[in-house]
């Protein structure tokens, strides 16, 4: 399950082209009223159903080239902020590879490694053969070009790109976008990038923000692997909007189950829904406070509390100490 961020962008795009939103979501079991909500989750099958509908609806097999240009890292939450504040393209790419699938839900998998000249990016898709796999590769590469250019200020230069599918009828779009030798029907999809160097600095780098965001991503990933599938899904859901956690009913809907079913499954884990939310907020509060870059007041509002005093009471209930006592204990430890 993952956020419907991309699907929401697809909806806006097809409506601008004059098509009905209902046609985009036909037979997908997706609620179009919810797709713009960071709390709403969809499955891979639903995502691919939307893509198939979009290609059929628009009659444009190369629509991914237009959609890839709409990439906005801010929409990717903590992962996007980590990439924007990273020190180098190397660090930003590592963040994407490590966390995008679990914390964003991007279906296509990415790997990168140094080459004799430049670097190689390898892409693999869980989609079966055909237009869906091709769509993902096209959108990912065009999106990557724009993200790399935005982060580094340098237009990417490719030595060669190989694709693991036959040459499409819209080959001209490939030549225009990538401007390098292209190979179709290859064993795998690989792009060799000559420029920029992956050690190139990020224009918006901020070491303090990067450290906080990257560590937060790692902690969330660690907790996901330790807490089981249901708790992992809930924490991923919470991460999308930590200042406005969903109600039990909203969480159940996002996970494709009733509130009663969610309660029953949590009971099997020996947890209540409120306990899961409190654990998440407590983990995030400690992380923010330990960073030394946020005041308790700022942390309170980032976690969705209506006042610092409400946050202080909650924090004492979670930890058995006041915020001041917690900060003093951290200073003594350091």
Image: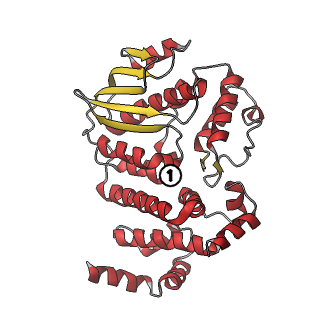
- Picture coordinates of residue 223, whole percent (x, y): 47, 64
**Which residue is depicted at the point 38% across and 48% down?**
95
Residue 89, image quadrant: top left
* Residue 156 visible in the snapshot: no
Residue 150, image quadrant: top left
- Picture coordinates of residue 11, whole percent (x, y): 67, 36
**Which residue is depicted at the point 54% across and 81% down?**
314
Q: Is residue 153 left or right of residue 178?
A: left
Q: Which residue is mark 1?
A: 103
- Picture coordinates of residue 164, whole percent (x, y): 47, 23
Query: Extreme left residue here?
Result: 116
Name the colouring of the figure.
Answer: secondary structure
Residue 278, image quadrant: bottom right
Q: Is residue 9 above or below residue 37?
A: above
**Which residue is depicted at the point 48% across and 60% down?**
225
**Which residue is depicted at the point 72% across and 56% down?**
253
Residue closer to the observer: 101 or 5: 101
- Picture coordinates of residue 201, whole percent (x, y): 26, 42
Residue closer to the observer: 125 or 103: 125
Residue closer to the observer: 255 or 25: 255
Residue closer to the observer: 142 or 236: 236
Q: Is residue 193 left or right of residue 124?
A: left
Q: Is residue 290 above or below residue 175?
A: below
* Residue 309 visible in the snapshot: yes
Q: Is residue 118 above or below residue 72?
A: above
Q: Quadrant of the C terminus?
A: bottom left
Question: Badge 1, how many Cα within 10 Å: few under 14, some, many 20+?
Answer: many
Q: Mark 1: which secondary structure? A: helix
């Amino acid at each position: 399950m993952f956020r419907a961020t991309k699907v929401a962008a697809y909806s806006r795009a097809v409506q601008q082209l004059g098509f009905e939103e209902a046609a985009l979501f036909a037979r997908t079991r997706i609620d179009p009223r919810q797709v713009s909500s960071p709390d709403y989750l969809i499955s891979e099958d639903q995502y691919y159903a939307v893509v198939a509908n979009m290609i059929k609806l628009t009659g444009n097999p190369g629509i991914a080239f237009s959609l890839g240009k709409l990439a906005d890292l801010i929409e990717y939450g903590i992962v996007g902020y980590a990439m924007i504040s990273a020190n180098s393209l190397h660090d930003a790419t590592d963040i994407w590879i490590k966390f995008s699938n679990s914390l964003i839900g991007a279906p296509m998998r990415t790997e990168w490694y140094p080459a004799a000249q430049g670097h190689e990016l390898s892409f693999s898709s869980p989609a079966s053969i055909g237009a869906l796999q091709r769509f993902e590769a096209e959108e990912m590469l065009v999106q990557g070009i724009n993200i790399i250019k935005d982060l580094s200020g340098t237009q990417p230069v490719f030595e060669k790109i190989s694709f693991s599918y036959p040459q499409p009828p819209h080959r001209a779009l490939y030549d225009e976008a990538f401007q390098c030798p292209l190979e179709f029907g290859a064993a795998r999809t690989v792009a060799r990038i000559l420029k920029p160097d992956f050690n190139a600095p990020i224009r918006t780098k901020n070491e303090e923000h990067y450290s906080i965001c990257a560590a937060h991503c790692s902690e969330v990933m660690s907790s996901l692997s330790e807490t089981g599938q249901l708790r992992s899904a809930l924490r991923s859901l919470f991460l999308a909007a930590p200042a406005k956690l969903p109600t039990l009913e909203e969480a159940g809907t996002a996970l494709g189950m009733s509130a009663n079913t969610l309660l029953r499954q949590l009971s099997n884990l020996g947890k209540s829904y409120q306990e899961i939310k409190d654990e998440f907020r407590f983990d995030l509060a400690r992380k923010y406070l330990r960073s030394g870059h946020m005041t308790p007041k700022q942390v309170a509002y980032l976690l969705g509390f209506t006042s610092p005093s409400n946050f202080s009471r909650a924090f004492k209930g979670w930890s058995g100490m006041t915020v001041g006592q917690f900060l003093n204990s951290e200073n003594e430890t350091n």
